[in-house]
Image (tube, rainbow, N blue to C red):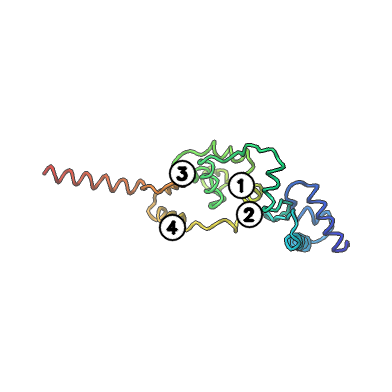
Amino acid sequence: MYSKKTMKSALETLMFMWGEPLDVKDAAEVLEAEKAEVRELFRELMTEYEQEGRGIRIREAGDAFGYVTHVENDMFVQKLCTPVRVRRLSQAALEVLAIIAYRQPVTRSEIDSIRGIKSERVIDGLMDKGLVEITGRSEGVGRPLLYGTTKEFLKKFGFASLKELPEVPEYEELRREREEQGGQLFMNFDAEEESPEENKEDIKEETNETATDEN
């Protein structure tokens, strides 16, 4: 059995060499220790780095831990590094990613139903970026594939777990209303728009008004 000091030192070395969030399971196997003990050591290191004001911090992502730079030092990094073009997600990709993050595990047909448009190519693009992965198959007809977010998603967006996703009460309320009405849920990330059901009511009222005027 290794001492606590030795295991902490080893975890720092392993994280540095691994280059990406290190799973607690893998670290525990290397140190020949229990996962709960290794997880606690990781968190102790996180606290120590923060209390000492280190320029390098440790971030928890799922059940893994990895090094990140202190956000307040970004200005110095920008001065040192040559500016590079940032690849941003398209509006469609953000929509699909949000649906998967909040509804996972979710099938492609469910995503298509929510958006009202096919999402196959968008999902493929998110998978290529490592933000989305196949998590299994549904028990429904045809057993379609189920999609969920990855550890890379947590890392890129700065979440320790999916529990840290911001609450979206408006989305949940709208979703429940649409499910009760047996209709689709249309998500709009830019501006408020009338739903298809509201448009139908407007058309019906206009038709009735026209018929009354003619009479």
Gap in Å between the C-alphas at discs 1 and 4? 28 Å
**129 shown above or below 45:** above
Q: Determine whether the residue tagged by mark 4 lies in a helix, strand or loop.
A: helix
Please state the horizontal and vertical placement of residue 204, each as a whole percent of the image.
25, 46
Please state the horizontal and vertical placement of residue 130, each as a whole percent of the image.
64, 42
Q: Amino acid at mark 3?
A: Arg
Sequence order check, earlier mark of 1 and 3:
3
* Mark 4 Cα-neighbour bin, 10 Å: few <14, some 14–19, many ≥20: few
Q: Name the residue carrying label 2.
A: 159
Gap in Å between the C-alphas at discs 4 and 2? 24 Å
Q: What number is the disc on residue 173? A: 4
Q: Name the residue carrying label 1.
A: 136
* Mark 1 Cα-neighbour bin, 10 Å: few <14, some 14–19, many ≥20: some
Q: Determine whether the residue tagged by mark 1 lies in a helix, strand or loop.
A: strand
> Looking at the figure, which quarter contains the C terminus?
top left
Q: Residue at x 28, y 48 (%)?
A: 201
Please state the horizontal and vertical placement of residue 49, each as a whole percent of the image.
75, 59
